[in-house]
């Protein structure tokens, strides 16, 4: 069967992809607005308390559920969303792209991550929500609570890098793998913040929504620039003949 990409005009598939991305960004922003409204009205308190307590030993709220190694693992995972780690990952990616001659893509990553960091700071300052005091904090925290900076930062960093890396791959399963890893990293960082008692669950949900929306908006800009030659084009999907040529499948007899 011939793929739609083979016979539809390029502008149709490109415009459709942009529309889907914008709709996803709008949905994420709408979800963020709904969560923020419930937080400001105090309607999320019961949900937040119930879920936060579900991660603690009922007889000792300073003791998280699970074996000791799980707490250690959660401390390690949560560091993947820290400012230091995200900055190092971004710097490494930007330098690699520059060395590979993809300066426009490097600029896109830098703008997406730096812009997301500024947006996270502004949102935290605007909502001014204190950290949970219901359970003991298992890691040091010094900033405000809503939205979760770790959840939001990991979303706009890993999702942006994942989408960019997926663009460089012609094989669909590699694209899916890369994007799946980016999503899983984002989810694990967010869950670790609730497990460690330093964020209300709605902080994390809002962080995921805001970070994903920002990543999608940046990706929409990338698609627009790509169509105008401002960003390096995406390699075409492999056809059956491509796979035969590269020895990945055996030609039919």
Image: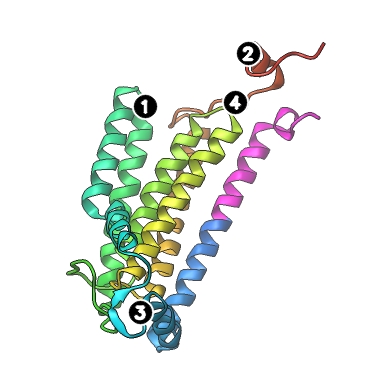
- Mark 2–mark 4 distance (CA, rounded to whole Å): 18 Å
Q: Magenta stretch: give its range.
A: 1-22
Q: Which mark is residue 236?
A: 4
Which label's residue is closer to the chain start, 1 or 3?
3
- Asked if the residues shown at circle 1 and circle 4 are in contact, with their CB atoms under 8 angstroms apart, the answer is no
Other-residue count near label 4 (Cα within 10 Å), few / some / many at <14 / 14–19 / ≥20: few
**Residue 104 is drawn in which quadrant?**
top left
Task: Describe the colour scheme in one phrase.
Answer: rainbow
Crowding near the residue tagged with mark 2, few <14, some 14–19, many ≥20 C-alpha atoms within 10 Å: few
48 inside magenta stretch: no
The x, y position of residue 247, in whole percent, is: 63, 13
Q: Nearer the viewer, residue 178 or 123?
A: 178
Cα gap from disc 1 to disc 2, whole angstroms: 29 Å
Instruction: Kindly indicate whether the residue at mark 4 contacts the one at mark 2 (C-beta within 8 angstroms).
Output: no
> Secondary structure under badge 3?
strand
Mark 2 — residue? Answer: 247
Q: Which residue is mark 3?
A: 57
Q: Tell me the crowding category of disc 3: few under 14, some 14 to 19, or many 20 or more residues within 10 angstroms, Cα based.
A: few
Please determine whether, in this image, residue 149 is positioned above or below residue 167.
Answer: below
Return the x and y of residue 121 as percentages of the image width and height: 26, 64
């Amino acid at each position: 069967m011939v793929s739609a990409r083979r016979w539809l005009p390029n502008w149709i598939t490109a415009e459709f992809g942009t529309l889907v991305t914008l709709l996803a960004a709008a949905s994420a922003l709408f979800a963020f607005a709904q969560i923020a409204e419930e937080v400001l009205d105090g309607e999320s308190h019961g949900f937040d308390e119930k879920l936060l307590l579900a991660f603690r030993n009922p007889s000792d709220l300073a003791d998280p559920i699970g074996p000791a190694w799980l707490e250690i693992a959660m401390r390690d995972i949560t560091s993947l969303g820290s400012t230091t780690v995200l900055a190092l990952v971004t710097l490494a990616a930007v330098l690699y792209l520059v060395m590979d001659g993809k300066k426009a893509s490097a600029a896109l990553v830098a703008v997406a991550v730096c812009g997301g960091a500024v947006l996270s700071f502004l949102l935290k300052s605007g909502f001014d929500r204190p950290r949970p005091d219901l359970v003991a904090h298992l890691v040091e925290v010094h900033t405000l609570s809503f939205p979760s900076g770790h959840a939001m930062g990991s979303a706009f960093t890993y999702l942006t890098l994942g989408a960019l890396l997926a663009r460089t791959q012609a094989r669909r399963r590699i694209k899916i793998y890369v994007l799946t890893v980016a999503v899983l990293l984002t989810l694990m960082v967010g869950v670790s913040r609730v497990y460690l008692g330093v964020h209300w669950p709605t902080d994390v949900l809002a962080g995921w929504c805001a970070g994903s929306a920002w990543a999608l908006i940046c990706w929409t800009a990338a698609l627009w620039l790509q169509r105008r030659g401002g960003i390096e084009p995406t390699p075409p999907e492999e056809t059956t003949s491509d796979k035969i040529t590269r020895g990945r499948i055996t030609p039919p007899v």
